[in-house]
Image (tube, helix red, strand yellow):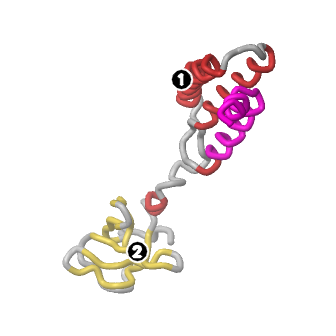
Amino acid sequence: MADILVEFWANQWAWFLIAVVLLGLELVVTGVVFVWLAVAAVVVGIVRLVFPEISWEMQFVLFAVLSFVSVYLGKRLVARHPVESEDETLNRRGERHIGRTYVVADAISGGSGRVKVGDGVWAAEGPDADAGSRVKVIAVEGTILKVEPDGGGGED
């Protein structure tokens, strides 16, 4: 039984299967690491096809070395060519509101209240303002909008 398992894991198809599993993990787990491990597994599978007499121990050593090299080179590649988004505030939703003017939903009293943003209501901090008055967002701290009284027409 042990011989069958060793023969399977020493087989090039096992390395291709490992590569497919690693690519599947890349789809599920965040971060760009498993794709580089999959590359290493594919290379070991190709080496096994070209050199069928290579021992399973050497295959594991080769996989370990290629994994380190491919992850290192892959991280450098990703760092050198970052993915740019058309929307700089894509994952910082609150920053989209800076400079915009909204209506106070719950009076800002004692420095905190709520403002109507679209079809929702956001927590706000700033100088006291009556419900219905207009305020301008000057900053965002987490999910709290920092506001000041609106001095002009502003946009909604």
Q: Position of residue 113 (x, y in %)?
A: 30, 79
Q: Position of residue 24 (x, y in %)?
A: 67, 46
* Residue 17 visible (yes or no): yes
Seen in the picture, residue 65 relative to 141 is either above or below; the reply is above
Q: Which residues are magenta?
A: 1-26
| Residue 15 among magenta residues | yes
Give the farthest residue toward the front.
1
Q: Position of residue 105 (x, y in %)?
A: 39, 84
Q: Which residue is mark 1?
A: 68
> Residue visible at 59% across and 29% down?
81
Predominant SS along the magenta part? helix
Seen in the picture, residue 13 relative to 145 is either above or below; the reply is above
Left or right? Give the position of 118 relative to 140: right
Residue 122, labelled with which disc? 2
Which circle's residue, 1 or 2, is located before the other in the chain? 1
Foreground of the two, 61 or 94 = 61
> Residue visible at 70% across and 26% down?
10
Secondary element type, mark 1:
helix
When asked about the image quadrant of residue 48, the answer is top right
Foreground of the two, 94 or 19 = 19
